[in-house]
Image: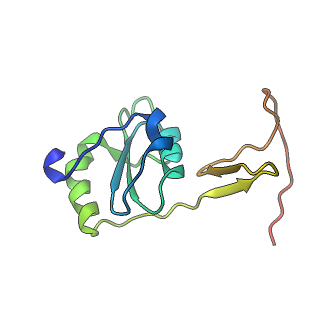
Amino acid sequence: MRARGRVQALERGFLPNSLFSPDDLVVAVGQDGLVANTLKYLDGQAVIAVDPDPSRFAGVLLPFAVEDLPAIVPEARAGTRPIRDLAMAEARLSDGQRLLAVNDLFLGPRRHTTAAYVLEYG
């Protein structure tokens, strides 16, 4: 992979403090939660979401396998790879907090419970 450009390995815990360049290509290797969490800290950078173990993870945000990377990375860097845009949900709280989510956003009490809401749009 290093032959394809500068590579920086980053542990999940360092994501909130990391700076990404506009032209960075991000490869997230892990579960759906890692991909969703990574997307919160990006601003339009392309992400290749890789499932490291398809027998254990069945994430909807993980379309690629590790062995796909040698073909996908050059295409993504050249801009010839088809991309899929994902919409981020955003919730702003009255105390100023901003929450972002990709596939779900839970609004409810902190304790283990179920919450039901009626949401209206427009």
Q: Residue at x 52, y 60 (%)?
A: 86
Q: From this viewpoint, is residue 59 visible?
A: no
Give left or right: position of 107 versus 67. right
Nearer to me, 37 or 23 = 23
Q: In the displayed image of the protein, which residue is found farthest to the left?
A: 3
Q: From this viewpoint, is residue 94 visible?
A: yes
The percent coordinates of residue 115 (x first, y second) are 83, 39
Quadrant assignment for the N terminus:
top left
Q: Residue at x 29, y 42 (%)?
A: 8
Using the image, determine if residue 102 lies above or below residue 44.
above
Q: Residue at x 45, y 63 (%)?
A: 44
- Which of the 4 quarters of the picture holds residue 79? bottom left
The percent coordinates of residue 101 (x first, y second) are 62, 50
Give left or right: position of 70 versus 118. left
The percent coordinates of residue 46 (x first, y second) are 39, 59
Nearer to me, 44 or 119 = 44
Looking at the picture, the colour scheme in use is: rainbow
Q: How many tags in the picture?
A: 0
Quadrant assignment for the C terminus:
bottom right
Q: In the displayed image of the protein, which residue is found farthest to the top?
A: 112
